[in-house]
Amino acid sequence: MRAPKPTDHFDVVVVGAGPAGSAAAIVAARAGLNVLLIERGEYPGAKNVSGAAFYGSAMLNKLIPGWWEQAPVERYICRRDVILISPTTAVSLDFRSASPDYAAPPYNAFTILRPKFDRWFAAQAEAAGAFLLTSTVVDGVIKERGKVVGVKVRRDDGEIRADLVIACDGANSFLAQQAGLQRRLETHELSLGVKEVLGLEEAAIRERFNLSGNEGMVLEYVGAITDKARGGAFLYTNRNSLSLGVIAQVSSLVETGKRPYELLELFKAHPAVAPLLRGAKLREYSAHLIPESGWEMMPKLVASGMLVAGDAAGFCLATGLYIEGINYAMQSGMAAGEAAIEAHRVRDFTRHTLERYTELLWPYNVFTDFRAYRHAPHFVNGERLQNLYPEMAAASFERLFRVDGNAKQKILPLYLKAMRQSGAKPRHLIADLLQAARSYLW
Ligand SMILES: Cc1cc2nc3c(=O)[nH]c(=O)nc-3n(C[C@H](O)[C@H](O)[C@H](O)COP(=O)(O)OP(=O)(O)OC[C@H]3O[C@@H](n4cnc5c(N)ncnc54)[C@H](O)[C@@H]3O)c2cc1C
């Protein structure tokens, strides 16, 4: 297929070939729409960053049946650990399942490497009939009489016109801001993730993480790992590598003066982490922003001639229990693709008709999930939850399991002592328990 010319007119231009953009392009192109997918990277995924645990297997199975048989997946996830950490101690909740929901098709989740996965996923959009234009930066939208009518690209030929532009350009979307749909985000609404991929032999991975065959594991850490900055850390098993990183709220990095790569080094050196990394060799280093405030930071999603999906719309669910953005990027991309088809059918791309997108986000479980967990992002970034309680839990268990010749204490006095020593106040604890209940229980 030849490269598009400025005179070309597309039904849909999708900006960004991440999970949101490729999903939108697949849906729209399969319905016969003339779709252009524009990506600034040399290839889709070249610079894209996630952990990456992909929790949307069953959902993607509806779009591409048996997708995991052809896609570059690493390991299916059957173990998940949440670990509270102090500088010297770790307390883990270890979940493992051999049930068919986790260990058989369509599987619950996979670890993936984005440069490989995104490239494969964008190829599915091409196979559906979309035209993929790489190494091309979109500099802004073209507006005429209040309607978005195309995009400006950083190439000689300058402008590409379309009935509909779907902005899937990721966190802190320049396009959404330029179209007046999103304000400039505050530093407490964004986190910075720094990540490394370390090569390690398959046999060592199986042995260290107690896995067999293609089983995989994700470990998520909270507490002293971010040294008073608000955030957490992760360690995921790939086929013959480990992905690990630290995520910290941008405002708390500024407040504490911590540098992300220092936090990453601290994490790697922790006594509960370092033995898992022994002998592993650095393959990649990357960093990326994450929109973490969920429901509260959602921009307007629709303008005449334009929709916003994925991270560009703030659809990354970061609740402490979950860090899921890839699946919501795909789900919102698919909803945007469907809205494009409906608008194309009636030849009407005004805001009124395109509002259908916001209705479709409910059955795709995007709005449902973000609304249900709307209180969680704020709660999870609270100072006490981030730093005080993990240290308290670690100190309590430290004392509980220590046999040092002194009389054994029962749990309540031991716990109250840990509370006193850490400076936690009972009234704060009660308030936090209520907040936790509101965030996660109902
Ligand atoms: C460290 C880290 C760990 C994470 N871990 C997980 C995890 O384990 N599981 C999970 O589900 N989510 C995770 N996330 C979140 C997840 O990465 C995002 O939610 C997801 O990538 C959003 O997909 P997207 O398609 O909306 O945006 P992106 O993946 O950011 O894709 C945007 C695309 O647009 C392109 N683009 C941007 N601007 C332009 C432009 N002007 N012109 C042309 N192209 C452009 C980019 O090159 C990119 O390809 C993590 C994020 C980070 C940073």
Image: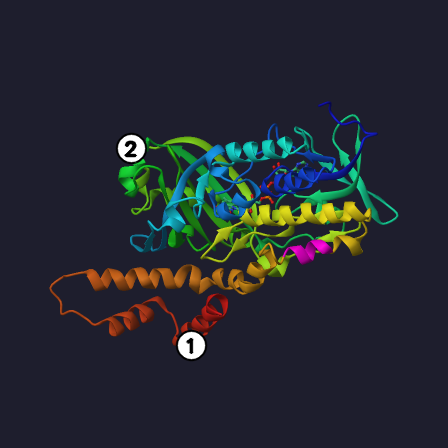
Residue 159 shown left or right of residue 319 in the figure: right
Q: Where is residue 399 in the image (x, y as percent from the top left)?
A: 23, 63
Dot 1: within a 10 Å radius of its alpha carbon, few (fewer than 14), some, or many (20 or more) residues? few
- Separation (CA) of disc 1 from disc 2: 49 Å
Q: Is residue 181 visible?
A: no
In this view, the residue in front, 162 or 46, is 162
Q: Main secondary structure of the magenta part?
A: helix
Whether residue 287 is visible to the viewer of this picture, yes or no, is: yes
- Looking at the rendered structure, the kind of residue marked 2 is Ala
Q: Name the residue under label 2.
A: 203
Task: State the count of labels.
Answer: 2
Tell me where residue 186 appears, x and y as whole percent: 63, 55
Residue at (47% x, 65% y) in the render: 440
Give the residue at x 57% y 59%.
370
* Residue projecting furthest to the top: 2
Q: What residue type is labelled 1?
A: Arg
Question: Dot 2 lies on which element?
Answer: helix
| Picture layout, residue 55 above or below residue 392 | above
Q: Which residue is denoted by mark 1 in the rendering? A: 427
Residue 186 got which mark?
A: none
Closer to us: 225 or 359:
359
**What range is drawn magenta here?**
356-361
**Callout in the foreground (1, 2):** 2
Q: Position of residue 64 (x, y in %)?
A: 55, 40
Q: Which residue is drawn at 43% across and 46% down?
A: 107
Side of 171 where 348 appears, left or right: right
Specify whether residue 115 is painted magenta: no
Q: Upstream in the sequence, badge 1 or badge 2?
A: 2
